[in-house]
Image (cartoon, rainbow, N blue to C red):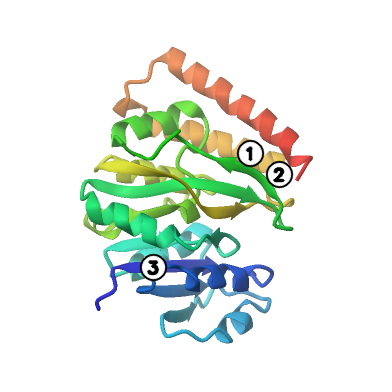
Amino acid sequence: MKRKLTVCIPCYNAEKHIKETIKSVLAQTYREFNLFIIDNNSTDKTLSLISKIKDKRIAIFKNKKNIGMFGNMNKCIQMTKTPYLKILCADDILFPECLEKQVEVLEKNDKVHLVYNANRIINDHEKILTTRRYFPSSRKVNGGALINSILKSGRNPVGEPSNVMLRTSILKRNKLVFDESLKYISDLELWIQILLHGDGYYINEVLNAFRIHTNSGTYSLYVNAIKEHSKLVSLYGEYIDLSIADIIVINMKLYLNLLIKSILLRFI
């Protein structure tokens, strides 16, 4: 059987969680996939741990030098030849039916190029911090409407790469990649690029867990993310006809979200 899906794990110094992440992929109910693990020149035991996991679906690659997080994700896109691509961050977890449910959506909806789902946010110790649900029920979401939500909400209404499965042909045909000049929200920018060409689909089931680290959620990180979100508004605002008043409201929401995140970080 010709495989339709590539799961790609870009990793760097991921020894703490990489085995658990890979284990969650190998435990999927959907079995026929390629698993590419691309190491970004790690200096810890990541490669040693990966090499001990034996499965015919796994292929391991190592970059000669560190090419950055989004550079490594772009390598995932470059190397994928299957119709569907799932980029999984090296410390996140897939629940058993994640791949099956997401592939099923893309198989049944040829105008859907991006599928995402409800998810959990956990910390380093597996504690559940919250569950994110983006709609009250599963549904197809118009691409333009989802772009509108991304720009106006000041949040990420799709989720991180681990939450998403992509239709590879849209990426290849339109030469879409992660913008490496954006250091914090390049994933959001790519979601917008994809949604300019089609629709999204939301599955109202918790199918994965996204891990937040205490040292990753810094105030300065969120401030820089706000600046990048403002850049997205400038780049793509014309597609939803933003007014000056809209832009003022968006920036107010961004700083309100910053305040909320800063408070929540104290309890992680």
| Dot 3: element | loop
Q: Work out whether 38 lies above or below 228.
A: below
In this rendering, does residue 66 appear at all? no
Q: Are marks 3 and 1 in contact (CB under 8 Å)?
A: no
Residue 254: x %, y % from top left: 57, 28
Question: In the displayed structure, does residue 81 sit left or right of residue 96?
Answer: left
Amino acid on which the number 3 mark rests in the picture = Tyr
| Count of marks placed on residues | 3
Q: Work out whether 66 lies above or below 113.
A: below
Q: Residue at x 55, y 83 (%)?
A: 53
Q: Are marks 2 and 3 in contact (CB under 8 Å)?
A: no
Looking at the image, tell me whether mark 2 or mark 3 is earlier in sequence order.
3
Furthest-top residue in this view: 245
Instruction: State the mark number for residue 30.
Output: 3
Q: Nearer the viewer, mark 2 or mark 3?
A: 3
Question: In the displayed structure, does residue 119 sit left or right of residue 17?
Answer: left
Residue 240: x %, y % from top left: 32, 25
Residue 151: quarter of image:
top left
Mark 3 to mark 1 CA distance (whole Å): 36 Å
Q: Residue at x 71, y 39 (%)?
A: 219
Instruction: State the mark number for residue 222.
Output: 1
Mark 2 to mark 3 CA distance (whole Å): 37 Å
Residue behind mark 2 = 218
